[in-house]
Amino acid sequence: MEEKKKILVVDDEEALCDGLGFNLEAEGYHVDTAYSAEEALARDLAGYDLILLDVMMGEISGIQLARIMKSNPATASVPIIFCTAKDTEEDMIAGLDLGADDYIMKPYSLKAVLARVRAVLRRTAVPVAYTKSDSNFVSYKGLVLSAKNRTCMVDGTEVKMPKKEFEILLKLLSNRGQVFTRAELLNEIWPDEVVVLDRVVDVNITRIRQKVGIYGKNIVTRSGYGYGFIE
């Protein structure tokens, strides 16, 4: 039997918080509630599969809580959906820039919330066979590479990838946050080939970005230098 997904709803409007929690429980999720960011921080946030987070709260705002979570390696990959009455473009951009996975405006319909929750959980799920303790697998959210089987999974779907593309992506994903020059990638991925142009790296990076969907945005270009996989 599949284990229930754990969701934490954080909102200082207690009636709304409890109501949303009740309806999510009815959908088969395990739900906890917190009426402030401070209360949420007292919990084991790394143990949740998703956080539904209100932006406007007391002393610690939802934006601040998200920033705290994203700065902590233990909670940085926990998906966040912001729920807020603030509807300016700046607020939305601020939340997404912090790494939020989605953004819902109040007043929202329950049907819309449930659809967003399902979508984010599906997008960020790592297949059961791929565990973090298994050194054969390198993953970021729903992007999972098997170094042993040479397979690439994107949100549960296998994506066919030629040898060189796979090796580049494996190199970048295994060294998140580090930027590699084109020369470094050429020397490692094409070690035995006499003449390989820098342009070959660029072409392969473009193809990889197209194949990995939303995770393509994590493969960044540092102008004049090279490429890296940035969270």
Image: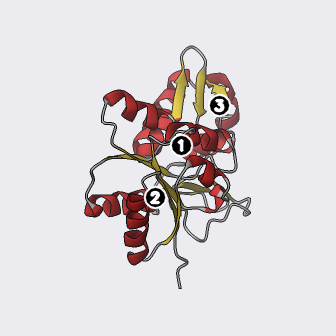
CB contact under 8 Å: marks 1 and 2: no
How crowded pointer 1 is (Cα within 10 Å; few <14, some 14-19, many 20+) is rated as some
The residue labelled by disc 2 is: 155
Residue 173 found in image quarter: top right
Contact check, label 2 and label 3, Cβ < 8 Å: no
User: Image quarter for residue 169?
Assistant: top right
Residue in view at x 43 percent, y 74 percent: 25
Q: Name the disc covering residue 165, or none.
A: 1
Q: Amino acid at mark 3?
A: Leu
Q: Is residue 9 visible?
A: yes
Q: Nearer the viewer, residue 133 or 161?
A: 133
Q: Position of residue 41 (x, y in %)?
A: 65, 51
Q: Residue 183, relative to residue 161: is it above or below?
A: above
Vertical side of 169 occupied by 43: above or below: below
Residue type of the residue flagged with mark 2: Asp
Q: Quadrant of the C terminus?
A: top right
Q: Residue 127, how many percent across, how many down?
A: 54, 67
Q: Residues within 10 Å of mark 2 (few under 14, many from 20)?
A: many
Disc number lying in front (2 or 3): 2
Q: Which circle's residue, 1 or 2, is located before the other in the chain? A: 2
Amino acid carrying mark 1 in the image: Glu
Residue 41 against residue 228 in the figure, above or below: below
How far is disc 1 from disc 3 in space, using C-alphas?
A: 11 Å
Distance from disc 1 to disc 2, alpha carbons, whole Å, reads 18 Å
Q: Position of residue 64 (x, y in %)?
A: 56, 37
Residue that numbered label 3 is attached to:
185
At label 3, counting other C-alpha atoms closer than 10 Å, the crowd grade (few under 14, some 14-19, many 20 or more) is: some
